Image (tube, rainbow, N blue to C red):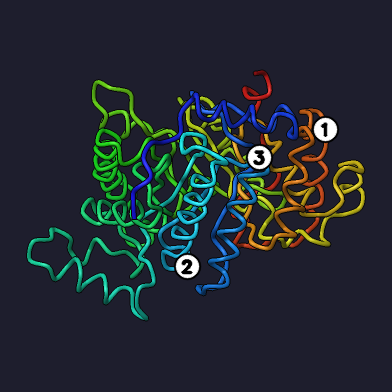
Amino acid sequence: MNIIPYKATAEGTRRYREKHRKYCAPDHFREAGELIVSSIGLGTYLGENDEQTNALVTKAVIESVRRGVNLIDSAIVYRDRQAERSVGKAVRHLLESGEVLRDELIICTKGGILPHVTSDPADWFCQHYIEQSISAISVTDLIDRRYCIHPEYLQDQLNWSLENLGVQTIDVYYIHNPEKHLSEITPDILYERLRAAFEVMEDAVDTGKIAAYGLATWEGFRVPPTSREHLDLARVKSIAQEVSGNKEDSFRFIQFPLNMVMPEALLAPTQNVKGEHVSLLEAAYRLGIIPIASGSIYQAQVVGQIPEKISSAFGKNFRTDCQRALQYTRSAPGLLTALVGMKAPEHVEENLAITAFPSLKREKFQELTHAIVEVLKSMPIDSDNWTFDLSNLSYPVSILNT
């Protein structure tokens, strides 16, 4: 199989926007450095590891790109590498049909979690990495039998992802759920391991394997500093700057959950930037890091759960709870893109219908946020999702003033 050359570019992503300007609201496309990126991105996480799902994901990628989505997100661990392969197949089809050029698409993936290549991934890992005499990886580099960010392992994961996707360059490569390492090691050790991982990432940028990198998290950036899984974004950025030396670092993206049920990234002051406690979105803005939301519709668990007084506030253009939830998340101030997983054609149609409408205005978004928080305060707190006092919330003031 021939490798697809090139990467996303300023010229290419602007060309893509021009193709879809007629059908999409003007603010559907947003700036991320020199790139123009859709406010909705396609996620490829869920589904069975079978040919039927592969076909659905491939078709969903193709149809999403046709309908104004130019950011596609995957991970090597998703469905044991099949998600990446389905994305690669779809991109190749789109290029061969002449519908897009490679430089119009932002292709993202992740590494650092063991793919389920056997019934016992940890045993497979030991055989292929630890027991090899030429490897510097040790058993202490494997956390919870699932996570590893050792430089040698990340290099191998990256090469696999390039092969699975069939591309010359991955536009954004994330280190996947690094906060999970804190179950077995101290924060200081984790940050040193991130330093070594960032050296691999910067080298990969220099050699053209990736264009930028970041961290994809679930708990790390949204839990309070007192939590064991907390990550300090300012410290992470500082490490990247130190690793890059005299040149600008390529640590430019973070990914985290944000939705109506999990608004911590927007409201909870989990981060410390120059002595001030701020929300994750505020911290990303101040540090020049581009934020992308995962879990934008709470894996569709919002369906039938949005109170009438909130759903009616979205207006008549949004017919379903999934549309309302996605519209809310993509309207968060400072956010680049809201990821949503889609496979079934009817879900692609439903979710992407909102590209024709502008994001919520700031006043409406703030009004809805206050209403949502009042509802959340009246609900029993799920300890898996909430680890902070809902009364201790702050709105990202600096972002609102831009």
> Which of label 2 and label 1 is nearer to you?
2
**Disc on res. 190:** none
Q: Which residue position is annotated with label 1?
A: 364
| Outermost residue toward the top in this view | 402
Distance, label 2 to label 1, CA atoms, is: 38 Å
Residue 242 rendering spot, x and y as whole percentages: 27, 29
Q: Which residue position is annotated with label 2?
A: 79
Label 2: few (<14), some or many (≥20) within 10 Å?
many
Distance, label 3 to label 2, CA atoms, is: 25 Å
Give the number of marks: 3
Instruction: First in sequence, mark 3 or 1: give its number.
Output: 3
Residue 254 rendering spot, x and y as whole percentages: 48, 41
Kind of residue at disc 1: Lys
| Residue at disc 2, secondary structure | loop
Instruction: First in sequence, mark 3 or 2: give its number.
Output: 3
Residue occupying the point 87% across, 54% down: 307
In the depicted structure, whether residue 227 falls above or below residue 279: below
Residue 370 is at least partly visible in this image: yes
Q: Which residue position is annotated with label 3?
A: 68
Kind of residue at disc 3: Gly
> Which of label 3 and label 2 is nearer to you?
3
In the depicted structure, whether residue 95 falls above or below residue 335: below
* Figure quadrant of the N terminus: bottom left
261 or 350: which is nearer to us? Answer: 350
Residue 312 rendering spot, x and y as whole percentages: 92, 46
